[in-house]
Amino acid sequence: MNNGGNITPGLYVVALTGGIASGKSTVADLFAKLGVPIIDTDVIARQVVQPGSSGLAKVTAAFGEGVLKSNGSLDRKKMRQLVFSDPRLRQKLESILHPIILSMTLQNIRDCHAVYCIVVIPLLAESGVQPWVNHVLVVDVTEQIQLDRLMQRDQISQQQANAMLAAQASREARLGLADDVLSNTGALEELAEMIFKLHSQYIRLAADKTNGQDFHR
């Protein structure tokens, strides 16, 4: 993927990542309550395959109309089962959607009017950190917690949950990218307190970048 060219001058970009069922959405919601703009690539991924979109047309051409529901929308459950059962199919889907998602993500960053923004990128460890990312925040939990939450959330078997975890980068790979690690194993109040401290830190880092003192990435 390319580097996105000219991102908004002065805007500090924090990439938020973490394994599946680690609590990224909860963390993003707490930042949003502090007034931080959130750009969620998972949300964008759903937008680019809405009925009538070029993204959905490309997916249908590649995988057939069997991945569509009767109303013409993408059958996400069926598509998820397909791509998690065959790495080649997952790569095929990613090659179609990732460039579209990246383009929309970068446009959203350019349209952002704030000192910093959070960009939620679940597959950051798999895709690599792009030059337009200034800071990486990893939401971290143990793999056992991921499994438990995933089985409960999606009502799936442990075998299916294990397959979904295996399809992602390892916990160690994600932690290796981290500038900050946010442990999401305690109470919501504790998480909110940690996020408030990070919020203050990111405002300072954004100010340093604006003043030409950004030495990161």
Image (spheres, rainbow, N blue to C red):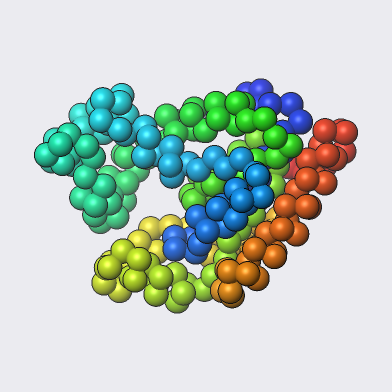
**The one of 30 and 86 positioned closer to us in this rendering:** 30
Q: How many marks?
A: 0
Could you tell whether 148 is left or right of 156 in the image?
A: right
**The one of 33 and 114 positioned closer to us in this rendering:** 33
Report x, y in % for residue 139: 58, 61
Which residue occupies 11% across, 39% down?
70
State the image quarter where residue 51 is shown.
top left
State the image quarter where residue 71 is shown.
top left
With respect to residue 32, does 100 lie above or below? above
Which residue occupies 83% across, 39% down?
207
**The one of 46 and 144 positioned closer to us in this rendering:** 46
Could you tell whether 83 is left or right of 200 in the image?
A: left
Report x, y in % for residue 106: 56, 29
Could you tell whether 206 is left or right of 28 in the image?
A: right
Which residue occupies 58% across, 69% down?
188
- Inspect this view and state whether residue 66 appears: yes
- Inspect this view and state whether residue 177 appears: no
Report x, y in % for residue 121: 52, 46
Report x, y in % for residue 78: 20, 50
Could you tell whether 143 is left or right of 192 in the image?
A: left
Quarter of the image with the C terminus is: top right
